[in-house]
Image (cartoon, rainbow, N blue to C red):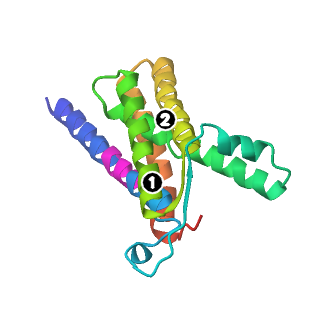
Amino acid sequence: MKNGSMMNKQERIKTVFLYGVFICYILFLCKLLLLSRVSLFDLFNSQRTVERSINLIPLHSIKEYIFSNSATIKNFAFANVVGNIVIFIPLGTYLSLFKNNKRVIPILLFIFIASLFIEIIQGLLGMGASDIDDIILNGLGGIAGVLGYRFVLFILRDKKKVRTAITILSAIGLPVLLYLLFAVRLRL
């Protein structure tokens, strides 16, 4: 009986740790996507000049990047495209891990709505460019996270082992996440 309760305690510790890392990740997303161009102080400054950029044409920004002759724009474009995909991979992974119902559509719908919400806030508050392409790229990142979770589950064939693998990856990523969250002023 003691071994069973010990296992239960380990699972609880893992769960609390995973939710803790997930909360840090969400805070990082907020900092990166909402506060990297405007500080909280500036946000409430009535003297601030608000610049809005909105693109509602799918793949328009990506096409502009691809056909640009400027190496600087191409480098920015690559970082922007890859970055918008990569930052949403953990969201797809964590949502797959935490959801009891493992259906993909609700997870992808949540990722789409979260990305749309962020773009709307960016546009309304003048905190960066609102771009339909960002929503598409964030969605691809979320899909990659879901597929990554499914792939690891297929390989390991055991949800507890997958949970342990994600816990280990989260433990490795946590110092980087904390560094980005607290030590670096993200200015995009």
Specify the segment rendered in magenta: 18-25
State which quarter of the image contains the C terminus: bottom right
Which sits earlier in the primary sequence, circle 2 or circle 1?
1
x 54%, y 66%: residue: 51
Q: Is residue 22 magenta?
A: yes
Against 14, residue 128 (above or below) is: below
Q: Which residue carries the number 2 mark? A: 142
Give x and y (percent) for residue 44: 37, 75
x 35%, y 21%: residue: 103
x 40%, y 79%: residue: 45
Compare residues 43 and 6 and report the one nearer the observer: 43
In the image, is 169 to the left or to the right of 11?
A: right
Give x and y (percent) for residue 120: 43, 51
Mark 1, residues whose alpha carbon is within 10 Å: few (<14), some, or many (≥20)?
A: some
**Residue placed furthest toward the right:** 69
Q: Amino acid at mark 1?
A: Leu
Q: Amino acid at mark 2?
A: Gly
Give x and y (percent) for residue 41: 40, 77
| Mark seen at residue 29 | 1
Residue 93 visible? The answer is yes
